[in-house]
Image (spheres, rainbow, N blue to C red):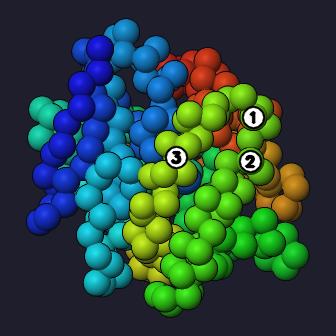
Amino acid sequence: MFETHKVSVDDGVELFASVGGSGRPIVLLHGFPQTHLMWRHVAADLAADHTVICPDLRGYGASGKPAADGPSVYSKRTMARDVVRLAGALGFERFALAGHDRGALVAVRAGLDHPEAVTHLASLDVLPTLDMWDVMRGESAAVGFHLYLMAQPPGLPERMIEASADDFFGYFLDLWTRDPEAIPADVRERYLAACRAAVPSIVADYRASAGIDLEHDRADRAAGRTLSMPVTVLQQDWGAQLGFDAAARWRAWAPDLDHRPVSCGHFMAEEDPALVTKALRDLLAR
């Protein structure tokens, strides 16, 4: 049985979270263009023996969407702090953390900034921000056109996306899914409605990853900071297609790494929830 919560994590910012189960806590962070709903299958399984916390990230879904009046408002550092404060308000000072896509970038930042809080960390189908930009070169960068669009100064990206929001967000739901039935029509519509109502904050999230998030990653790299907890990465084999070694990229950040290539599509928690659940249970046993 899952219950919904609204928790204040910053001045004027509340996070919505669906919470269920009991036992050792794990926080599950959604990706783009989705909400906490993407974890519906995995969360139900894990709740048999864990407290499962599924929030909507700042700027997404039913969570607060503050105006991006400075670069830090949607930095992954701020969003990671939100997650730590959410877990603390729910009674958990230490917790495992798994993120998909944008949520994985928040999870990595939380692991770097709050190692005392994050016991285990899982990332689904991204590279850390610094590496993501480094591997996007030449014609291969076309697959990430949205990253460049939303990196532009405020104004034009928001207007372009708002003018065709369902087409824009729906494009990624279609392109990145190998099994279309994994995201049924009613769930798809909920994703589209949530994104339609959050264009400025979603763009601000992406814009931060082309600016302040890079600054934070570069500072950590220069200081030699790494993730001290056990880390599991599930990833499509983009490295083979784009010419980089994904496991090596991750190992530079995560010395205690279990890197697992997958054959399902990007939305793996919906396309192959059993695979994701097993990987998370294996991680929690380390």
**Looking at the picture, does residue 207 appear above or below residue 201?**
below
Find residue 170 and report its horizontal and vertical position in percent. Answer: 66, 53
Q: Write down the residue under mark 2.
A: 174
Q: Which element is circle 2 on?
A: helix
- In this view, the residue in front, 76 or 245, is 76
Looking at marks 3 and 1 on the same chain, the residue that comes earlier in the sequence is marked by 1
Gap in Å between the C-alphas at discs 3 and 1?
Answer: 14 Å
Looking at marks 3 and 2 on the same chain, the residue that comes earlier in the sequence is marked by 2
Gap in Å between the C-alphas at discs 2 and 1?
Answer: 7 Å
Q: Are marks 2 and 1 in contact (CB under 8 Å)?
A: yes
Label at residue 180: 1
Find residue 59 and report its horizontal and vertical position in percent. Answer: 36, 61
Q: Identify residue type, mark 2.
A: Asp
Res 104 visible: no
Q: Identify residue type, mark 1.
A: Pro
Q: Write down the residue under mark 3.
A: 191
Q: Are marks 3 and 2 in contact (CB under 8 Å)?
A: no
Res 195 visible: yes
Residue ID at (84%, 70%)? 140
How many numbered marks does the figure carry? 3
Is residue 229 found left or right of 17 in the rendered image? right
